[in-house]
Image (cartoon, rainbow, N blue to C red):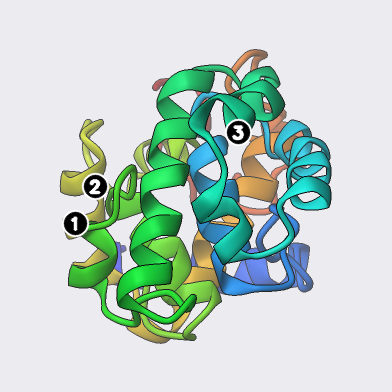
Amino acid sequence: MTKEKLALEIIERLKKEYPEAGCTLDYDQAWKLLVSVRLAAQCTDARVNVVVEDLYAKFPDVNALAEAQVDEIEAIVRPCGLGRSKAKDISACMKILKEQYGGNIPETFEELLKLPGVGRKSANLIMGDVFGKPAIVTDTHCIRLTNRMGLVDGIKEPKKVEMELWKIIPPEEGSDFCHRLVFHGREICTARTKPYCEKCCIKDICERNGIKD
């Protein structure tokens, strides 16, 4: 089976397994996803979802957060880890949104990458979830699972994985596919325990069957 055919089959099976899969970061405005995805680095989405409630209670919009002191932001986001670095990025990012984009977020991948603390993974997430554009989010689940499944061959660098997946994943499927990989990676194809291959919906076509990383 070619990688293209394997990808299409995996996409269809994961659709049936996780029909409602979406972003696990809570947000109701685009700028909030920008904040949450920065906080999510080396932190669980569940913890981020709790922490941002306090952040937005004190700073409810882009202007308020842009005017906040870095120390004030850090005091709230510290439970997410790397508090100082994340607070500085959030502060700088909100200032740019306020001053250059009227409180909105930029709508192109290139502009998003220019924002403090925004890398390819974050930019892709926003392009897919906020703007409905083709996107491939190479988080740890995506990298681990696509290697195990045989969609990429021993590649661990996020950008290289992304480039390989663009060759075989239909553009309109990329964003949802990556969300489903997160759910599958948490429930079945786990990282910290032996994968539950016997429960896996793609066990018969998975190249490595979860045995190798």
Dot 1: what SS?
helix
10 on left or right of 80: left
Residue at 18 percent of width and 70 percent of height: 110
Q: Read off the residue under disc 1.
A: 164
Circles 3, 2 touching at the beta carbon (< 8 Å): no
Dot 2: what SS?
helix
Circles 2, 1 touching at the beta carbon (< 8 Å): yes
Say what amino acid the circle numbered 1 marks.
Answer: Glu
Residue at 52 percent of width and 24 percent of height: 42
Which sits earlier in the primary sequence, circle 3 or circle 1? 3
- Alpha carbon distance from label 3 to label 1: 38 Å
Farthest residue in the top direction? Answer: 193
Q: Find residue 193 and report its image quarter.
A: top right
Quarter in which the N terminus is drawn: bottom left
- Alpha carbon distance from label 2 to label 1: 5 Å
Residue 6 visible in image = no
Residue 47 visible in image = yes
Q: Read off the residue under disc 3.
A: 73
The location of residue 53, given as percent across then percent down, is: 83, 46
Few, some or many residues within 10 Å of mark 3 (<14, 14–19, 20+): many
